[in-house]
Image (spheres, coloured by chain):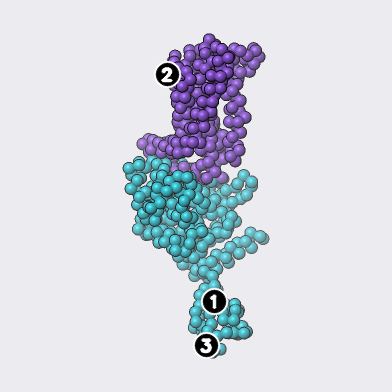
Amino acid sequence: MNAMQIAVALWTLVGKEVRRFTRIWPQTLLPPSITMTMYFIIFGNLIGSRIGPMDGYDYMDFIVPGLIMMAVITNSYSNVASSFFSNKFQRSIEEMMVSPMPNWVILAGFILGGMARGLGVGIIVTGVSLFFTRIDVAHPLLTIGVVVLTAALFATGGFINALLGKKFDDISIVPTFVLTPLTYLGGVFYSISLLPDFWQGVSMLNPILYMVNVFRYGFLGVSDIPVGWALAAICAFITVLFAIALWMLERGKGIRG
Amino acid sequence: MAEPALSIRGLTKVYGNGFHALKGIDLDVQQGDFFALLGPNGAGKSTTLGVVCSLVQKTAGKVSVFGIDIDKDFARAKNNLGVVPQEFNFNQFEKVEDIILAQAGYYGMSHREAKPRAAELLKDLGLWDKRDGSARALSGGMKRRLMIARALIHRPKLLILDEPTAGVDIELRRSMWDYMRRINREEGTTIILTTHYLEEAESLCRNIAIINHGEIVKNTSVRELLGQLNTETFLLDLAEQVSEVPTLDDFQIEKVDSSQLAVSVKRGQRLNDLFSQLSDLGLTVVSMRNRANRLEEMFVSMVEESNAEAAK
């Protein structure tokens, strides 16, 4: 395939993915908006008003970046995991396998589709948050950069999960037992400076902490960890996961007899 | 001589559970051919075709499509291939036309090029009125035709059909046959077909391979294969009722019911002799037909022979 044909194939796949999650918006776009509204009302307004400032910021302002990031992470991941797995389940993945489309295009198409949903939900949640607080962005480019990279990282993770999954239960295990706890413990609702030294050390092993903190730094200009180091770590994670996913796809893991 | 549309050498497939699905098969399908790959369930037909279209990873061997080695340039080889699998493998929730257009996109066809081609195929295959509906609303026969339209969107030179008419009613099956004959004859598309309907293979295909236990048992033309048929069994409907099986010289005969006889006619025997002997006995034949499709008889005998060999 020449470059133009590859671009057409990639555009086709991304367009198909975007049409999928917009067609079923009551399942994909609406629920995270409602959940995040609940977080803003309960944690931000009702409980937050009694907690007082966090790292020198109003509690609502502190949790907004974390909640946006949480929505982006969950939706990027689950979009690719469920879409690719359902392609496997319905065997419509064979449409792509029999075509001359290179494997990296298939992988990139699903990742970009997942990113589109993650970032779309992120924009919706940001819009919802404007009903509760005013958002000032200290470093706009950094903010956009880190949220895009995070969406790419978790979309790639979702792809690997779907490749390995054999039944629908398998694609809900990681989000339920890994992603959700890591997100909650990733400094969405609190600053890790509140934790004892030992637990601060343990928290530093949580990759989501870095993403939430860099994103918050982009908004507020305050972070628990060095921003440059965190960005480098996210890029490294993306490279490694993309390479693993591509290797699995080339070998036909989970999709080829 | 032109490169074969498909050339397979020493193709071997051993699945993870140790099952030896293909045992080093060799097969050539010439350009423009209408070729049948026949075999009982689990013989290795779908595995062979799966390797050719990248759905199954081969263990060993070489496969070339129009001279392009799939190990060297699978993408270019795939450009020449259209695949209609045995089972429905499209997203049932998508619109009919969207399924075809997406497939065109995967082959790098621009929307401008794909749209009229999709319309042409949807019209040819009687799906035009359904183009905006969800694929799950289609009948089984329509879903099969949708997969044919999808496989042809990029104008492949080799079309692989894995049991394309399974579960399709007779009228629709015949219209699909006409369509396949047309693209084979008019567009020169090479067609490889697997089927359990031997009548289908006899009616459509010029050449044939029979596979069993992962090995090619026979690879020849349909005409030559039928020429090897030693015995044909005919069912004769009689005007009279018979209580006992009539005795005929040189013909093996059995009674099916009081007005129907089954007669085995060996190669070289003349039907005239049969009819004259029946006339002498005062029996009138009002109609006759083959007990089984001729190719089916041949197929069954070859598979039985191959099973007996395998059991040794």
Residue at (45, 39) in percent of width and height: A23
Which residue sits furthest front?
Answer: A46
Which residue type does callout 3 highlight?
Ser
Question: Which is more toward the observer, B40 or A45?
Answer: A45
Residue at (64, 16) in percent of width and height: A199
**Other-residue count near label 2 (Cα within 10 Å), few / some / many at <14 / 14–19 / ≥20:** few
Q: CA distance from mark 2 to mark 3?
A: 99 Å
Which dot, 2 or 1, sits closer to the camera? 2
- Residue A216 is tagged as none
Q: Mark 3 falls on what kind of element?
A: helix
Name the spot of residue A12 as percent of width and height, x first: 41, 38
Q: Mark 1 falls on what kind of element?
A: strand
- Residue B279 is tagged as 3
Which residue type does callout 2 highlight?
Leu
Residue at (55, 85) in percent of width and height: B240
Residue at (60, 21) in percent of width and height: A185
* Residue at image mark 2: A141
- Marked residue chain, label 1: B
Same chain for marks 2 and 3? Answer: no
